[in-house]
Image (spheres, helix red, strand yellow):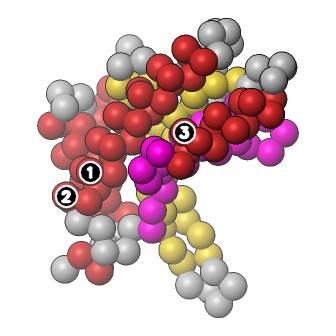
Amino acid sequence: MAENITPEIVHQYIQQYFLGIGLTKDQVYDAQAEAYYWMRGSARLEMFMTKFVTGSGFTRHYLRIFSPLLQLPPYNREQAYRYLLELSHGSLCVKMTMREGSDFVFAAFERDIVGMDYIEFFNMVSDMEWWADELDDRLKKMFPAEPTAPSTPNAAPPPPQ
């Protein structure tokens, strides 16, 4: 039953997904960061689980996927923010985020794992892959500078090649 999903079951989904696209856990998993890293087109992706304890002491687990997209240009910030909001409005289920104190924009997709089955997991990951590749291509055209991407939110090294 999908309501009783545990982080261990989601990790099984993750392994099944990567095997389905021809990657092994050894190729994508960083044990120190407890995160998975891979590429889709020109997009670099990171996936990991986050535990959140509510005020009442209940623990919730979230599956999170991030992809670094763009370092904001030092010029036309208002135009850049507007363009990002417009992209975010049209990128179904994917939002644009920034870490506090950073000028780097990420695509993000996150969801509580309660009730998640493999089909929903698969759609979440494959949709994020498509959107991350699409958004980073659009942003490179709009803002052609090529900055070095920072560490993704979990701050682990880039994926193995």
As measured in the structure, the alpha-carbon distance from the residue carrying label 2 to the one carrying label 3 is 26 Å
The residue positioned 81% from the left and 23% from the top of the image is 76
Between discs 1 and 3, the one toward the N terminus: 3
Q: Residues within 10 Å of mark 2 (few under 14, many from 20)?
A: few
Q: Position of residue 6 (x, y in %)?
A: 34, 70
- Front residue of this view, candidates 108 and 131: 131
What's the mark number on residue 87? 3
Kind of residue sitting beneath label 2: Ile
Q: Is residue 154 left or right of residue 137?
A: right
Q: Magenta span has 96?
A: yes
Q: Residues within 10 Å of mark 3 (few under 14, many from 20)?
A: some
Q: Is residue 90 left or right of residue 123?
A: right
Kind of residue sitting beneath label 3: Leu
**What range of the chain is rendered magenta?**
90-112
Residue underneath mark 1: 123
Q: Secondary structure at mark 1?
A: helix
Q: Do the residues bearing badges 2 and 1 touch, measured as CB atoms within 8 Å?
A: yes
Q: Is residue 22 visible?
A: yes
Residue underneath mark 2: 119
